């Protein structure tokens, strides 16, 4: 399982770099709204940090750290990336299109944030709990 988390973390990190490059060069051609650009940059930043955290979790699978808690941690980070960053990417698109649907997507973002927080708490618990394996 840890190889899958490592591969996902690496892939999501690469996508964050590509998304960041688009945000720095292409997005400004589509919109000049600073708030929309900031929302997009926040999505990229959180995706990048949590993709790296996922790589860290994959590496920790080889250490004497609670494996079950590490799996939960990894799934929380993945879910957080999808919900938090994904909703912000979608909000960016919907706001550029001036769609009223953006109000429906907004509540998803804090749920993704809760998954990030849960992941960090689980990582702390995994580090503190002795592994039985």
Image: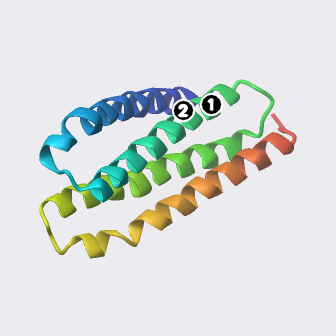
Residue at position x 63%, y 34% from top? 57
Q: How far separated are the C-alphas under marks 2 and 1?
A: 6 Å
Residue at position x 56%, y 36% from top? 54
Quarter of the picture holding the N terminus: top right
Task: Give the image's coloring scheme.
Answer: rainbow
As rendered, which of 87 and 132 lies closer to the eye? 87
Q: Could you tell me residue 93's position as x and y percent?
A: 20, 56
Mark 2 surroundings: few (<14), some (14-19) or many (≥20) residues within 10 A: some
116 up-or-down from 131: above or below: below
99 up-or-down from 80: above or below: below
Residue 65 shown left or right of residue 102 in the figure: right
Residue at position x 43%, y 30% from top? 13
Kindly indicate the quadrant of the structure image that contains residue 68: top right
As rendered, which of 37 and 65 lies closer to the eye? 37
Residue 83 shown left or right of residue 75 in the figure: left
Query: Can see residue 1?
Result: no
Q: Could you tell me residue 8's position as x and y percent?
A: 44, 33
* Label 1 secondary element: helix
* Label 2 secondary element: helix
Quarter of the picture holding the C terminus: top right
107 up-or-down from 7: above or below: below
Q: Could you tell me residue 42's position as x and y percent?
A: 42, 49
121 up-or-down from 48: above or below: below
> Which residue bears the numbered disc 2?
52
Query: Can see residue 20?
Result: yes
> Which residue bears the numbered disc 1?
56
Residue at position x 28%, y 75% from top? 103
Q: Are marks 2 and 1 in contact (CB under 8 Å)?
A: yes
- Tell me the tag on residue 103: none
């Amino acid at each position: 399982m840890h190889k899958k988390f490592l591969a996902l973390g690496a892939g999501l990190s690469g996508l964050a770099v590509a998304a960041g490059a688009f945000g720095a060069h292409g997005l400004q051609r589509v919109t000049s709204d600073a708030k929309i650009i900031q929302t997009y940059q926040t999505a990229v930043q959180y995706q990048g940090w949590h993709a790296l955290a996922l790589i860290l979790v994959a590496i920790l699978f080889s250490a004497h750290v609670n494996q079950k808690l590490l799996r939960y941690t990894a799934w929380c980070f993945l879910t957080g990336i999808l919900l938090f960053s994904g909703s912000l990417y979608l909000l960016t698109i919907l706001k550029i299109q001036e769609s009223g649907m953006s109000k429906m997507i907004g509540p998803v973002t804090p749920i993704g944030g809760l998954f990030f927080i849960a992941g960090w708490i689980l990582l702390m618990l995994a580090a503190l709990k002795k592994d039985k394996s």
